[in-house]
Image: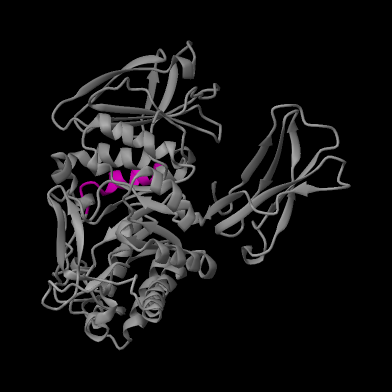
Amino acid sequence: MRAVQGEVLEITLTTEEALPAGLMAVLATTLNTQGGKTWGEVPFVKANAKSLSCHVTPRHPGMHSLRATFSLDDGSTWVGDTVPDAFVLIDPPQVDGLRIYTLIPTVSGNLEDWAADLTRIAAMGFNAIHLLPITALDTTESPYAANDLFDIDQSYLTPGSRKDDFKQLQDYVANAKDHGIRLCFDLVLNHIGVHSKMARRAPDWIVPDPNQADGLKRARYWTSGGWRAWNDLALINYEHPSEATRAEIWAYMKDYVMFWASFAKETGGFVRFDNLHSSNSAFVRSLTRGIQSDIPEVAVLAEYFTDESTLLDSVPLWGLNLILATPWNYKFVPELREYLNYIHRVSEQIRYFMPITSHDSGSPDQEFGTADSTVPRYVAAALMGTGATGMPEGVECGELRRIDFIGRQARRSFDAKPRFAEFVRCVNSILVNHPAFRRGQNCQFVDGGHPSILAALRTNAEGGTPGYLVVCNFDIHSAQSITIDLTSVLGPDGPFRAHELLGGEIKVFTQARFDLQLPPCGAWVLEFFGPRPLHVSSAPSP
């Protein structure tokens, strides 16, 4: 199970037959005990003739154990398993409603410049900043090829400052916190620069490769054409045959993670694990357990690409709070619809972070054919997912090409009013103010499989209004029309009023079955008013 710190967790026990007289039940759990290392009890109460329930508001993030204990004689004697038969991962609160902006350090100037950008980023409604690795760069000047894992690159320091390196970083961290911005530090577990201090001083910590002139094995990545090597990245040897050396490597890399996580902790932020699918699984499990034990208020975001079965097994086991989703890989509407259904279907076990594009992918113009596609693509990523979204630097400006993050470059400038900044602010505001968009399994597509339009109902568990209709036209060339039938939702008697949240207008529909026409790359987000509850009869299909 999964829950969020501070939100009520309901646990229900259900029987096939009526509950016997004299039955009592207690939930034994490490939830809300000191450090999650002792056991406490929460009584179940009878909900109906065949079920018991209890409610807990988790106070501490991390992995917690659960088991039930029963009495059939009004509490005189008790029976129950001594081994926990259930576990719940409590996410820290920043996991809910994450809106993260990826800052490219190599093109963004120095720490003083980054601080100046906080106001601009916060004004667009972002509540977190993902910093690509800011460790000292190796000779290729890629943020993912570090020279020293415990040092900040000198190009990021403010010229002429009398403050030392990490005092400058601490000032930036404090400034981000003052702006309501959480920081996410990108960490690289698998590899290091081939000319790094580690490779020079402890070459036996690197996987050996007799085919390389320097004897160091290169990290690799998979493409449609097969495996290719990153020639600037040496592969760290987590499976070193010497137990003592292996322990040194593990301890060193844990210290590296905890060092940078300490800065994230100051903002209630995140660490991001790059390329986690290529990492040593035993080390990752040990590492995340250490985070949960020592700094549970820091959330873990992972770039982790593998099959669904492996995800369902490892994500809860490792305590990964958010996994990177890749909506830009689903360029056509039918496959994007299927992917969004998947995101909701697994949301009780896996929480996905779904940005419009990534710093590794192309820009919206490159991926989808026009920068105008930013509108439907960001609406889909933010309002058809489960509530965690974001974008890399430059998307708000309608950049035609992604920003190259390799190599120290002059600081880029921004227009006074970036093309999509107000639109982004509006979408992020909807995500903040309407909790229905931050839930899983409350999304049903009502577009009849339209080839160009996605139309999704989002149920409103909080009550008040019936719910929301999100409609996006992904056709970059032509307007598209669609007939929407909400009779089963709104009832037969109109008229029906709706607030279009992107533009602010009030729309009136005479009937529950109505036609919509959207321009190329157009989007509507309709909040319907009315006394009838919104009811979705079936769960999202796989």
Magenta residues span 417-430
Q: Residue at x 83, y 40 (%)?
A: 72
> From the viewer's perspective, is residue 110 above or below residue 22?
below
- In the figure, residue 38 lies in which quadrant? bottom right
Q: Is residue 424 magenta?
A: yes
Does residue 254 show up? Answer: yes
Q: Residue at x 20, y 47 (%)?
A: 419
Q: Residue at x 24, y 38 (%)?
A: 330
Relative to residue 212, is residue 270 drawn left or right? right
- Percent across and percent down for residue 467 are 47, 29
Relative to residue 238, is residue 75 drawn left or right? right
- Percent across and percent down for residue 368 are 17, 40
- Viewer-closest of 445 and 312: 312
> From the viewer's perspective, is residue 113 above or below residue 337?
below
Q: Is residue 510 magenta?
A: no
Relative to residue 404, is residue 319 drawn left or right? right
Does residue 179 show up? Answer: no
- Viewer-closest of 257 and 446: 257
Name the image quarter holding the C terminus: top left
> How many tags in the picture?
0
- Percent across and percent down for residue 94 are 47, 56
The extreme bottom residue here reads 162
